Image (tube, rainbow, N blue to C red):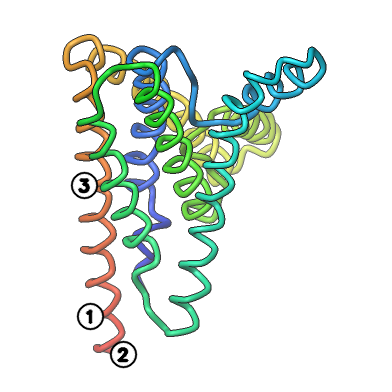
Amino acid sequence: MKPMQGSKIYPTAVMLTLTGGFLDAYTYFVRGKVFANAQTGNIIKLGIALAQGNHEKIIDFLMPITAFCIGILVVLMIEHIFKKKNIRYIHRAVLAIEIVSLLVTAFLPDGEVTNVICNIIVSFVCAMQMEAFKTFLGQAIATTVSTGNLRKFIEYLFKAFFSKQKEDRTTTLQYFLIVILFITGVIIGTLSSEALNIRASLIPVAMLGVTYIIITVRYRAILKAEREN
C-alpha cells in the first residue's frame, strides 16, 4: 500500500495546529494585541472604519487583509508552476517560505511600525499555511483557525452517537484533539511570549522545521514504495 503524503498525515496537522495557535498568542501579546491568523476581525474593523469615515484606520486594516490575499496567491502560483514542471516539493516550498518569514519577525524590534510589519508577515504566513494544508486523513482540517474544527467535532460527535461506527468515533476524536492542540499552541505561545518576547517566534520556526522533516521522511518512503512497485 502506497504511504499517504506527508502533507496529509495527522502528525503534520498536529505540528501546524500548534503553530497556528502559537502565532495568534504571539501577535496578541508581543505585536500589539492583534490576531493575525484570521481576517474576519480585520474585515469587520475595515467596514466600521469605512462607515465612520476613519480613513487613517482603513489602511491599517487593509494591509493584513492584502497580505493574506497575497499569501493565498503565492501558494496558488507555486502549485501552478510546480505541477506544470512536475515538481513534488510544493508543501516543502511553502514551509520554507513560512520559516524564512517568521525568522524575520524574530529579529524585528518591538515598535509601532515594526509590529505592523510583523503582523502583516504573520498574516501572509497563515494564509499560505491555510491554502497549502487543507486536508488531513481525508478530512478538511484548518490549522490556523478553530471555528470550523469545533463545528466538525460537534457534527461528528452527534453522528457517532447515532451511527455507532468506529470510523465516526475516530474522526470525532481527531477533531477534538485538533481543537485541544490549537488551545495548547496558544498556551505555549503565551508562556513563550512572556519569557522570550519578540524571539518567541523562533519556536514556531522550529515547529515548521519539524513539519518539514516529517514531510521529507514520508516523501522518501513514497519514493521507495514506487521503486519497489
Q: In this picture, is 174 found above or below 213?
A: above
Residue 215 x, y percent position in the rendering: 28, 59
Label 1: how many Cα within 10 Å (few below 14, some 14–19, many 20+): few
Quote the CA–CA distance across marks 2 and 3.
Answer: 29 Å
Residue type at the position of mark 2:
Asn
Quote the CA–CA distance across marks 1 and 3.
Answer: 21 Å
Q: State the residue at coordinates (37%, 30%).
A: 118
Residue type at the position of mark 1:
Lys
Q: State the residue at coordinates (42%, 56%).
A: 8
Q: State the residue at coordinates (48%, 27%).
A: 179
Residue 56 x, y percent position in the rendering: 63, 19
According to the picture, the residue beneath numbered tag 3 turns out to be: 210
Which secondary structure, mark 3?
A: helix
Work out whether residue 191 or residue 64 is closer to the camera in this orientation and state it.
64
Residue type at the position of mark 3:
Val
Which label belongs to residue 198?
Answer: none
Q: In which quarter of the image is the C terminus?
A: bottom left
Which label belongs to residue 229?
Answer: 2
Q: State the residue at coordinates (44%, 12%).
A: 33
Contact? badges 1 and 3 (CB < 8 Å): no
According to the picture, the residue beneath numbered tag 1 turns out to be: 224
Quote the CA–CA distance across marks 1 and 2.
Answer: 9 Å
Residue 22 x, y percent position in the rendering: 35, 26
Left or right, 88 with respect to 199, comes to right
Label 2: how many Cα within 10 Å (few below 14, some 14–19, many 20+): few
Between marks 1 and 3 in the image, the one whose residue lies nearer the viewer: 3
Counting residues from the start of the chain, the first of labels 2 and 3 encountered is 3
Residue 11 x, y percent position in the rendering: 32, 46
